[in-house]
């Protein structure tokens, strides 16, 4: 981030741009704003806008009681942290091997990793379900996470970063008697910290939001993450009213939304960093 | 390391063992949940679905013939192409405009960035709920708006002509802000002296964009394009909430059809054949990126 010494006034957005940009932004934020309105007001105000409408938290209370959201929150949190932890460890080891070792079959191995960038686990539902059934893991948190544990994206990202770290640092550590794993832990991991943060944010938001695979592989409250729980809860046949559904919807998105508002800059930068190869 | 013979060769094989040990956990998992299922899916697509006591038997191309004769499959293909054809240009175009705006000193820039990007971090399944409310007949927000304009009531999601368009709108809304980030990143790496030069030359804004910014953004556009194509074939969460593929399959997408066949009708053989189609689509997009677009990036 390096703002030029002095921005030229030339070509800056004019009033018309500003107006259009704001209109688009309001349009973009409208669904969320509307959900907030509905969730915090009694249901009779869900389609009637009045500044005098009383505020209430009742919808949240009713949603919380109507479905085991506490359990869903716990499941999602455990799931997201488990996936992230395993991803980071496995990807760090693999990326280090690719970045600093020369061995026969390295290119083939790397190509095999990159295959996952093309064929994401979200598509191979039938076979992966079968595997989980054979392993007896259906309806467990581990089953939701397993296909994502080895992340080609994380390996790729970390390998690029590790390759940018001067070899001299590695050699200096070796001379002082550090083993490969010690070098990795003391030299590479600390230097790659921003990339770890970036990947963590991307991974957490992806798995917090992931739906199709968890839907298929879970069938009880024990393992269901928030997204699937919300979908079960807000199905049309459940007969809950809109205010309660929007309250549940906001609850589900709240942790990410709050994190995003607090760490907006980091979020945006991490997506940038993660996206640019 | 320039290895000679003897000692260093031994050291080399030692290093190779280390390297493979480091790779092992990741490669085992990749093999188990990406490579093997891909191959198995392909093989299974030539067998029948095992049912009860009857095991799977070789049926050759029967699943594919069934697919060719399946009107829902063709409907899903047509819908998916329509969906891709609409979401890709719309979300990329909007992303570019958003990025050009928030890259400049515009009033309320921080708010604008946040507003555009927020949909990206929210769960699709959650925001689809909100959109469902928007589209609800009689009292939904859209109805209230059109009603105020004196237009007749319309069931947006229940009408075959509008259901797919409604789904498309949600997808564009969700994706534009995400792609904006990549354009924004690219714009910020452009050399500021280009701007100074253009200012001195007195170039118009449109001219500057067309002749300087746009060509320099080309690699980003290609990257975003590939992502957009892939997303167009794997984004289905909102279909579950908004229409469930209906009415009468008017909004079924390929992945949703695959889900229905595999996990509602439990016809796993036919589902495998459908998976093969999706894998081929996604793999060709990715290979196109690797070999045609990204020639300068070497994966070594």
Image (cartoon, rainbow, N blue to C red):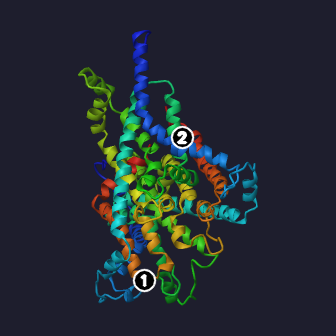
Can residue B200 be seen in the rendering of this structure? no
The C terminus of chain A: image quadrant: top left
Q: Nearer the viewer, residue B172 or B261?
A: B261
Q: CA distance from mark 2 to mark 1?
A: 50 Å
Q: Nearer the viewer, residue A206 or B120?
A: A206
Between marks 2 and 1 in the image, the one whose residue lies nearer the viewer? 1
Q: Is residue A265 left or right of residue B143?
A: left
Residue B27 location (% of width, % of height)? 47, 37
Disc 1 crowd, CA 10 A, few/some/many (<14, 14-19, 20+): some
Residue hosting label 2: B294
Q: Is residue B122 left or right of residue A121?
A: left
Identify the residue shown where x is 54% and y is 40%: B294
Q: Does residue A190 lie above or below A40 as drawn? A: above
Q: Could you confirm whether marks 2 and 1 are on the same chain?
A: no
- The quadrant in which residue A129 appears is bottom right
Badge 1: chain ID:
A
Residue B188 location (% of width, % of height)? 38, 50
Residue hosting label 1: A241
């Amino acid at each position: 981030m390096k703002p030029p010494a002095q921005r030229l006034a030339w070509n800056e957005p004019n009033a018309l741009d500003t107006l259009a940009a704001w209109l688009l932004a309001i349009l973009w934020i409208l669904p969320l704003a509307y959900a907030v309105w509905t969730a915090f007001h009694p249901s009779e105000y869900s389609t009637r806008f009045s500044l005098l409408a009383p505020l209430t938290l009742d919808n949240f209370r009713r949603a919380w009681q109507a479905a085991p959201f506490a359990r869903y929150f716990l499941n999602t949190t455990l799931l997201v942290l488990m996936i992230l932890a395993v991803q980071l460890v496995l990807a760090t080891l693999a990326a280090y091997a690719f970045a600093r070792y020369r061995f026969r079959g390295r290119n083939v191995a790397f190509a095999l990793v990159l295959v996952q960038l093309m064929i994401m686990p979200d598509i191979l539902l039938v076979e992966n379900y079968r595997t989980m059934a054979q392993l007896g893991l259906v309806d467990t948190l581990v089953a939701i996470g397993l296909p994502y544990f080895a992340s080609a994206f994380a390996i790729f990202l970390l390998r690029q970063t590790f390759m940018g770290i001067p070899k001299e640092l590695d050699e200096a550590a070796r001379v002082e008697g550090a083993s490969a794993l010690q070098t990795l832990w003391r030299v590479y991991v600390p230097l790659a910290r921003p990339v770890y943060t970036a990947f963590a944010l991307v991974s957490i938001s992806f798995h917090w939001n992931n739906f199709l695979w968890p839907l298929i592989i879970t069938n009880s409250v024990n393992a269901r993450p928030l997204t699937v729980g919300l979908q079960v809860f807000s199905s049309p046949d459940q007969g809950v009213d809109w205010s309660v559904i929007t309250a549940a919807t906001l609850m589900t998105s709240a942790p990410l939304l709050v994190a995003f508002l607090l760490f907006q800059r980091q979020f945006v930068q991490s997506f940038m960093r993660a996206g640019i190869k | 390391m320039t290895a000679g013979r003897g000692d260093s060769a031994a050291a080399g094989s030692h290093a190779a063992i280390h390297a493979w040990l480091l790779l092992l956990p990741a490669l085992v998992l990749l093999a188990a949940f990406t490579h093997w299922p891909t191959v198995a899916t392909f093989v299974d697509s030539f067998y029948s679905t095992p049912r009860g006591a009857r095991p799977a038997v070789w049926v050759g191309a029967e699943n594919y013939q069934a697919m060719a004769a399946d009107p829902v499959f063709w409907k899903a293909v047509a819908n998916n192409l329509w969906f891709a054809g609409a979401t890709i240009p719309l979300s990329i175009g909007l992303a570019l405009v958003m990025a050009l705006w928030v890259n400049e000193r515009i009033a309320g820039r921080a708010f604008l960035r946040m507003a555009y990007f927020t949909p990206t971090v929210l769960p699709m399944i959650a925001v689809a709920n909100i959109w469902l409310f928007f589209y609800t007949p009689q009292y939904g927000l859209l109805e209230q708006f059109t009603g105020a304009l004196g237009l007749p009531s319309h069931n947006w999601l229940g009408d075959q002509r509008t259901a797919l368009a409604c789904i498309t709108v949600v997808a564009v809304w969700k994706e534009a802000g995400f792609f904006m980030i990549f354009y924004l990143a690219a714009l910020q790496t452009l050399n500021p002296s280009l701007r100074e030069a253009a200012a001195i030359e007195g170039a118009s804004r449109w001219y500057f964009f067309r002749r300087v910014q746009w060509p320099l953004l080309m690699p980003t556009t290609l990257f975003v394009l590939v992502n957009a194509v892939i997303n167009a074939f794997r984004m289905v969460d909102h279909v579950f909430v908004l229409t469930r593929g209906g009415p009468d399959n008017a909004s079924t997408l390929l992945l949703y059809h695959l889900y229905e066949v595999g996990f509602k009708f439990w016809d796993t053989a036919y589902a495998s054949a459908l998976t093969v189609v999706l894998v081929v689509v996604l793999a060709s997009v990715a290979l196109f990126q690797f070999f045609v677009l990204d020639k300068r990036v070497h994966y070594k």
